Amino acid sequence: MEVIEAAVSKLAEQLQEARAESDRLFGILKPEALYQRPIAERHRVIFYIGHLDSFDAIRICREALGMNSPDAELDQLFLAGIDPDSAHLPTDSPTDWPSLDQVKAYVKRCRRRVDDALDHVSEEMVCMAIEHRQMHLETLAYMFHNFDYELKAPKADERTANRHQAFPTEEWCEIPAGEAVLGKARDGSFGWDNEYERLRVSVPAFAVQRYSVTNGKYLEFVNQGAKLPNFWRRHGGSIYLRGMFEEFLLPFDWPVYVTQQEAHAYAAWRGKELLTEAQFHRAAYGTALGTTRTYPWGDSEPRDILGNFDLKRWNPEPVNATPQGDSAFGVSQLVGNGWEWTRTPFGPFPGFHPHKAYPGYSANFFDDQHYVMKGASSRTAARLLRPSFRNWFRQDYPYMYATFRCVDN
């Protein structure tokens, strides 16, 4: 009993920490930004202020425990996000949403109800609430990235010197044929439904770039006629990177953030391909001895020296900045500094079953329009760095902190 109580207490503490982090994130916006929509494909910010705690109350109190809600209409309003294609964008107006005071009061009621219910709900449901919020910390960060700087009031600006840095020499790592272990075993620890079941795949030998494609290398592609990525800006004869809180001259040794379509086009231009999900796993977690690692660097817990993740930075860092985080095959930053686009459509593993508490989480996106991303960005929480975790977006979605590297099969 003491062990169970300690586990519940630890999860409750983690939920409180995640709440505090989301409150801090909303705090970087000035009030006039809260009813704006920083990117066309997503809700206005005010929705997310209500959604994070609405999700917790709906899943934990209503769905898991059968409790009646005093805020049924607001629950419905803040129930679900959106993922429209470019032809079906939202058309709501600011006046369609409650006032900020009303939303804040709703959030307080949701948190009070959830806190009262934590001792009566499964650890799985609390983990779902924590990870849902942590995933939104990242999606909100890239949304806020697109706001005009005057709408943000950063507590600590992450400034970058206005200078180009030489991008590292291109290197390739040989990955021998072997087994890739995808998915997650049902071992009692939390996982989302698309992570199951565990799957073993034979992967032929291939070569992969040691580093993600840099801004400097991608600039060569742009100079051949490709369009600028979403995070780049041209001012006069120079190209700048749009950072979270300021623009600065394009750092040549940072990973380029692009869409899956742009990544695929660059790889084709080079006569190469993108990683498959199985190739990513083989390069990231496999070893020449046939064993499987917990993380690319081994089995030790994530630390700053091993990669750019867990809210370490707002912006990327050089692709060769964290060699201690390299995989057994010498591939750098497979976790952290930017999600890795793959050429694998997002779909179920054999044995997939929708989670009964959240049946639409994955299944709604098994449509051959979304592609798997692996790894992590600087804004990805540490608990989401497990190998089985899968991210996905539409192939033309330009806002994610997502990079890529080329494969020679």
Image (spheres, helix red, strand yellow):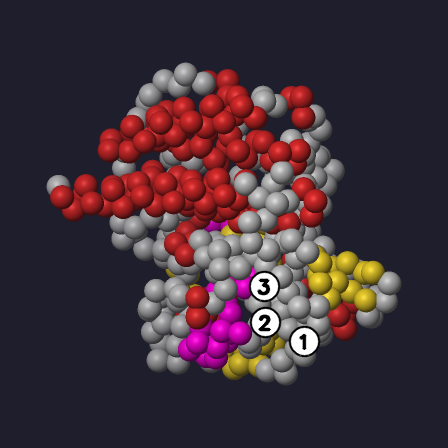
> What kind of element bears circle 1?
loop
Horizontal side, residue 42 vs residue 375: left or right: right
Residue drawn at x 78%, y 65% as measured from the top left = 239
Residue drawn at x 44%, y 53% as measured from the top left = 381
395 in magenta: no
For the C terminus, the image quarter is bottom right
The residue indicated by pointer 2 is 318
Whichever of callouts 1 and 3 sits on the residue coming sooner in the sequence is 1
Residue drawn at x 67%, y 26% as measured from the top left = 94
The residue indicated by pointer 3 is 316
Q: Residues within 10 Å of mark 2 (few under 14, many from 20)?
A: many
Residue drawn at x 23%, y 45% as measured from the top left = 7
57 over 165 or under it: above or below:
above
x and y, in percent, of residue 296 in the image: 42, 70
Residue 165 disc label: 1
Asked whether disc 1 touches disc 2, contact meaning CB atoms under 8 Å apart, the reply is yes
> What kind of element bears circle 3?
loop
330 in magenta: yes
x and y, in percent, of residue 113 in the image: 35, 26
Q: Which residue is nearer to you in this view: 63 or 308?
A: 308
